[in-house]
Amino acid sequence: MTSPRWIIHLPTTLTSLDGAIALAAALRDSLGHVTAIDFGETTLSEEDQQFLRARIWCDAKLDGAGRCRRRDDHDGSCGATDEGPRR
């Protein structure tokens, strides 16, 4: 039996989806070396609808090493480089 994983909910004062995605990407880029954080499973939700969560990144395993860093709903093949926020 494996131990349960813990989720840290980190509320922000941001009011736009693009801003929240940019903050999540900045946290991933600055804290990516911390192996206890699984940034591929990052989700966003509106403050009053926390039960409706949306994944940010695809996180599919890539050939060789690493995981896809593109948006969860990206077109085309997976890749190790970021995509900007959807407009």
Image (cartoon, rainbow, N blue to C red):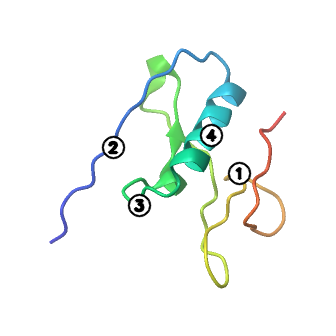
Q: Are marks 3 and 1 in contact (CB under 8 Å)?
A: no
Q: Is residue 49 left or right of residue 83?
A: left
| Residue type at the position of mark 3 | Thr
In terms of secondary structure, where does tag 4 sit?
Answer: helix
Q: Of discs 2 and 3, which sits in the foreground?
A: 3
Mark 4 nearby-residue class (10 Å; few <14, some 14–19, many ≥20): few
| Residue type at the position of mark 4 | Ala
The residue located at (18%, 62%) in the rendering is 3
In terms of secondary structure, where does tag 1 sit?
Answer: loop
* Spot occupied by residue 84 in the image (x, y as percentages of width and height): 80, 43
Q: Are marks 2 and 3 in contact (CB under 8 Å)?
A: no
* Spot occupied by residue 66 in the image (x, y as percentages of width and height): 61, 72
Residue for badge 3: 35
Q: Nearer the viewer, residue 80 or 1?
A: 80
Q: Are marks 1 and 2 in contact (CB under 8 Å)?
A: no
Q: Is residue 69 left or right of residue 44?
A: right
The residue located at (67%, 53%) in the rendering is 72
Tell me if residue 81 comes above or below residue 15 in the rendering.
below
| Residue type at the position of mark 2 | Ile
In primary-sequence order, the first of circles 1 and 2 is: 2
Q: Is residue 74 left or right of residue 68?
A: right
Q: Are marks 4 and 1 in contact (CB under 8 Å)?
A: no
Calculate the distance from the C-alpha at mark 3 to the C-alpha at mark 1. Answer: 21 Å
In primary-sequence order, the first of circles 2 and 3 is: 2
In terms of secondary structure, where does tag 2 sit?
Answer: loop
Q: Quadrant of residue 10?
A: top left
In primary-sequence order, the first of circles 3 and 1 is: 3
In terms of secondary structure, where does tag 3 sit?
Answer: loop
| Residue type at the position of mark 1 | Arg
Residue for badge 4: 26
Tell me if residue 43 comes above or below residue 49 in the rendering.
below
Calculate the distance from the C-alpha at mark 1 to the C-alpha at mark 2. Answer: 21 Å
